[in-house]
Image: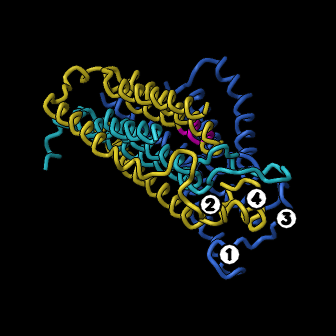
Amino acid sequence: MTLYLLCFALFLVGLYGVIAKRDLIKIILSMGILGYAVNLFLVLVGYRQGGHYPILEGQNPVPVMVDPLPQALVLTSIVIELGSTAMVVALAIRLFQKYQTFDISKIRRLRG
Amino acid sequence: MNSGMTIIVKTVTRITVWMILLYGIYIILHGHLTPGGGFAGGVVLALALLNVLLAYGRSYTFQWLRLPWLEHVESASALLYLVVGLLGILWGGTFFYNFISKGSLYHLLSAGTLPILNIIIGLKVALSLFLVVWVLAEARTSKGDAA
Amino acid sequence: MPIELWLNFLFVLMIIGSIVALELKDVLSSIIAIGVVGLGVSISFLLLQAPDLAIVQFLFEIFCVVILIQAFIHKSHHQMESSRSNRWLTAATILTAILLFIGCLPLFKVLPPFGKPLMSTAQYYLDHGAEQTGAANLVSSIVLDYRGYDTFGEVTILFTAILGTFTILRKTAKAKHHGGQHE
């Protein structure tokens, strides 16, 4: 349970960065931290005590293995995260070319 | 910046880039037996191409890799994945049916369509990540020219 | 239980690393701190018996750091000192985060203890995966065979993200190039 709580604390650090920071670079990094926390939590939930990694190696009694389903989901999630990070970076570069700043409080025309 | 780095870096890169490419292909082809697979191997291939881009500069890499052709391959690989799934409907009745024979466990040529899908995903990931870095570098250089 | 101790240590390290990454003024230092956090995630995956994920996370972390440094390192010198964060907003966010943490404490008691997985679906994959797909790597068999349709969606998302990046950046590059020729 301590591990789950620490994972949640990591998530809250990322949330704090997304809400309270004004620099676009810091917001992109906080989105990365949020992704790490969620991926770690999914893999933590699938861990089995004393489990073996889910790859067969020819042992005759097949050992107790950890849950492979969260690992498969997280595998695709990491790749998607990188694609979205690249797209956000591209948007930030475009905003910098237009407004010459990364401070979101100075990008006036985005204000709703 | 466009001409790349010193001759020492270029020589070392010329030798090592083939080894990195070979390692990436090894990871992709053994994806159904060992840790790794299309995602990890694709990133290794993209990092090898990125090595060439950093060492030799942009104009040389543009000629060596023929970038417009690579973009077409990158777009087509998503379609190839769909084609494999549709072939599964044709032979087995369900989408992504494993229609090639399974072979025996722990052999390289086994597991039916899994190695094919691994190769397609590796190609897709490698080319798309390399093209992202290429476009980001292009944008930064054009901005530097303007400033 | 040594694994839990190691994981506790790594998680505390990652929390400290992410706070450092968010609070530092220098952009290069923050990106490197994020790289440290990502490598900690990679080692945690290795300890949690997921070597596939460890390899992928390690490589993607390197790639992420390269992309961020390449994109941001030249633009950051002149505007970092002017960007002050709002103190009231920061205090309110930290307070809300602490309240959320305390308020969610009872929810975590509902979860099963560490080391006992929630889902029973996995046993079917572990028992029948090898003979039904012929792959020794069961994660690979789930990604590409049982859940091939999910992976197709993932390929589509990657394709769309890359296409979006191209559309956003190519237009600016061409416009700048055209403007330069015009002058």
Q: Describe the element under mark 2 as helix, strand or loop.
A: helix
Which residue lies under the disc numbered 1? B88
Q: Chain of mark 4?
A: C
What amino acid is found at the position of numbered circle 3 in the picture?
A: Gly
Asked whether the residues under marks 2 and 4 belong to the same chain, the reply is yes
Cα distance in 3D space between marks 4 and 1: 18 Å
Magenta region, mostly helix, strand or loop?
Answer: helix
In the picture of the structure, the residue carrying the numbered disc 4 is C135
* Residue at x 72%, y 53% (from the top left corner): C137
Q: Give the residue pinned by disc 2.
A: C122
The 10 Å Cα crowd at callout 2, few under 14, some 14 to 19, many 20 or more, is some
Mark 1 Cα within 10 Å, few/some/many (few <14, many 20+)? some
Magenta residues, start to end: C54-60
Q: Earlier in the sequence, mark 2 or mark 4?
A: 2
Chain whose colour in the figure is blue: B
Residue A86 at what x, y percent from top left? 43, 44
Q: Colour of chain C?
A: yellow
The Cα–Cα distance between marks 1 and 3, rounded to whole angstroms, is 17 Å
Of the residues shown, which amino acid type is indicated by label 4? Ala
Q: Earlier in the sequence, mark 1 or mark 3?
A: 1
